[in-house]
Each structure stands twice: as structure tokens, then as C-alpha cells.
Amino acid sequence: MKLSRTLLSAGVALLLAAPVAAQAKEYKVGLLLPYSGVYAALGKEIDQGFELAVQSRLGEIAGSTIEVVREDTEVKPPVGLAKTRKLILQDQVDVMVGIVSSGVLGAIRDFVHQSGTPLIVANAGNDDATGERCSRFITRVSFSNGQVNRPMGEWMHRKGIKTAYTLAPDYAAGHQMIETFSAGFKAAGGKVVGGEFTPFQTTKDFGPYLTKAKAAGAEAVFVFYAGGEAISFVKQYASFGLAESVPLYGSGFLTSPLYVNAEGPAAKGVITSLHYVPTIETPENAAFVKAFSAAYGRAPSEYAVQGYDAGQALIEAIKTGAADRAALAEALGKARFTSPRGPVEIDPATNNIVQNIYVFETVEGNGGLTQKILDVVKAVRDPVNGCQK
Ligand code: PHB
């Protein structure tokens, strides 16, 4: 399904006044996101962040145009691969942006690499995509699963938690998030006493899993859930009565500002970690929150920032005058931009972003639930993990 096409063109007046630069080009961008399924809200938020960056910085590529072709990956690896093939072979896009699910990223990686089409990953944390299966055509401006979770294992142990029980959906991201959290927790001296993976996208009742988690007798429960599954899980954790006896921790997608207010009071007191929260106090973030809120009527989440920075990286790459896909890929790997989330850089060894990780508690604020930053782990960089670009 072709969702829509947008043609973004830099000021006509400017074109008339000045001769068109030699490298002026029509860039075709494939936006590959879930516009349906459990991650649909995430896809929409990334899309809006991307649009905001491109619209507001379009003047910097005067003479060139950006045409956007949108495709729905749903949350299904075979669908994601079919849409990737369509964008590359039929639409002949110059560059692709998006991918939310680690499962979809794993499925398209080889085709993307072999076709030599640059891909800016705007969510999917699949560790392999910037590790063992890295590619000079893949640049990630979002996060890696390990980057978000490894520091949290150490942090929790430092706060006196010695035992934990884990839960996550049964697919690539669930496994990697739990594996890297557990590695950090164990390295610090903690013990994971048990855990389970729940069927992805089909689990509606977490009751049986919560019964087992309670019986395990751990001091804390650590989970990864996102989107619709996060809302159900957090609500059921509280209504099951577990929140009073065993505190809930997780990767911050669990209590994303995108849907934390749908979770309601059940989310209060949950402590998680993430690469962005809208409460970061810097002039860059204040400007971003203001611009995003003005455009869409709500505060931005981590997904909005990922879309925004994907747009910024694209603009920077186009500004180099990159004439073909290989040049675009190279420029993307070297892109420098100011992110609302704090200092960032693309690691030349892996093409994964280097960034701060914020540990935060969800608390009651003036206009609903908000994020209280408890700690910042600075400049978290992934190990090279076998990447040979
Ligand atoms: C992933 O599949 O990599 C993924 C999905 C949703 C998130 C984070 C990671 O919020």
C-alpha cells in the first residue's frame, strides 16, 4: 500500500533569484514505518518528527527537492522486506528512513546492504545491525538495545537491588534488551532469578506471567514492552497488586511520554532508562519541545526525536552535495547535528549513535505524568561487537 507522497521543495523565490547550484538534485526518500499494528503510534510519531526537521531545515538545501514515499511495514518482517524491495527496485529511492521493529530490521538488512541503498534507522535497536551484521549503508540515529539497557543493570545494582526477574515479548528486541540488561546486572554482582518471554503482539492477559514473577520472589521486576503492549502491561502490573510489593523497572519505552498518560496512575513510580525525555533542561531541547508542541499539540517523545534527528542527518548529508547513494551513505555515517537529547555523535566504527542514557522516574506533574531525571550515564558507546564495515 502506498500511503502518501509529499514533495518538499525549497523556496521558489530563492530559485528565481539565484542560479541553481550545480549539485541541485531531486532526492527520493522511502519512509518505512509501522502505520498499523501494536507499534502504529510509534510510526506516526517518528514520521511527524521527521517532517518537522525536513520542513524547518529545507531552506538549507535550496535548489534540491525531497520527495517522500511512505510504506507500511506493519510489525511483520516479511512485509517489511517486501516494502523495502518495492521502494528500492520500483520507486528507486535514494535513501530510506525508519524501521521500528528489530525483527523487521534483521529481515531487511541483507537486501539493504546488497542493494547499496543508505538506510537511516530511526528506531529499531537490533544490536546486530551495528555489530556483527553492520553495514556502511546503515546508520542508526536512534539507539541500540544494549546501549539503553546495559547501564540500567549497573544502576539498579548500585541502588541496592540484588535480584531481578525479567519479562519481554518473544522477538529479537525483547531478547536483546533482556540479555544486555542481565549482562550489566550480573557484571555488577546482581542475580537474575528467572524470566520469561511472552508471545509478541498476541498476549492480552499478562496474569499468568505475573503470577510466576511474584512466585520468583525477586527484589525487582525488569521488563521491555513498548506501544500497545506497554500500556496493557503497566496497567495489569498495578491491578494485579504486584507494584506494592515488587518495584517495576524497565527500558524507558515502557513509560514513554507518547502513551504514559494512557497508562495513568499505574505508571507512577516506575523507574526506567532511555536516551531522551522531554524534561531534559537545555536550550536545544526547550526549542525542540516548543516547535514540536506548536506543530502537533503535544510534547515530543523519544520516537519524535529519533524521526527529527533522522531528518537532520538527511539534510546534513544532502548539504554535502552527495550525488549518488554511495556518497549519501558515506555522508550519513559522518553526519554531525545538534540533537535535543544532548551531545551525540555517529561512531565511525559501527555507525551507531553515541549518546547519554537518562534514568528517570515517572511522577505526577502539573499537566499529567512527567519524567523526573534521577541520573545521567554520559556518552554511552557500544562495543564494536564484530562490526567490519
Ligand atoms: C525494537 O523492536 O527494536 C523496538 C521496538 C519498539 C521500541 C523499542 C525497540 O520502543
Image: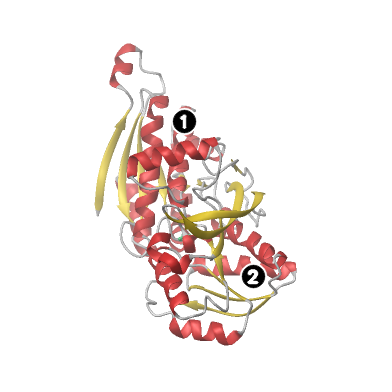
Label 2 vs label 1: CA separation?
42 Å
Badge 2: residue crowd in 10 Å (few <14, some 14–19, many ≥20): many
Q: Is mark 1 within 8 Å of ligand 1?
A: no
Q: Percent position (x, y) of residue 370?
A: 48, 55
Residue 322 numbered tag: 1
The residue lying at 33 percent from left, 44 percent from top is 296
Image coords of residue 40 (percent x, y): 34, 59
Query: Closest to the observer: 252 or 202?
Result: 252
User: For the residue carrying disc 1, how many other residues have a C-alpha within 10 Å: few (<14), some (14-19), or many (20+)?
Assistant: some
Q: Nearer the viewer's eye, disc 2 or disc 1?
A: 2
Residue type, mark 2 in image: Ser
Q: Which mark is residue 153?
A: none
Q: How many marks?
A: 2
Give residue 110's position: percent from left, percent from top.
47, 56
In the image, residue 210 sits, relative to residue 389, either above or below, namely below
- In the picture of the structure, the residue carrying the numbered disc 2 is 182
Q: Is mark 2 within 8 Å of ligand 1?
A: no
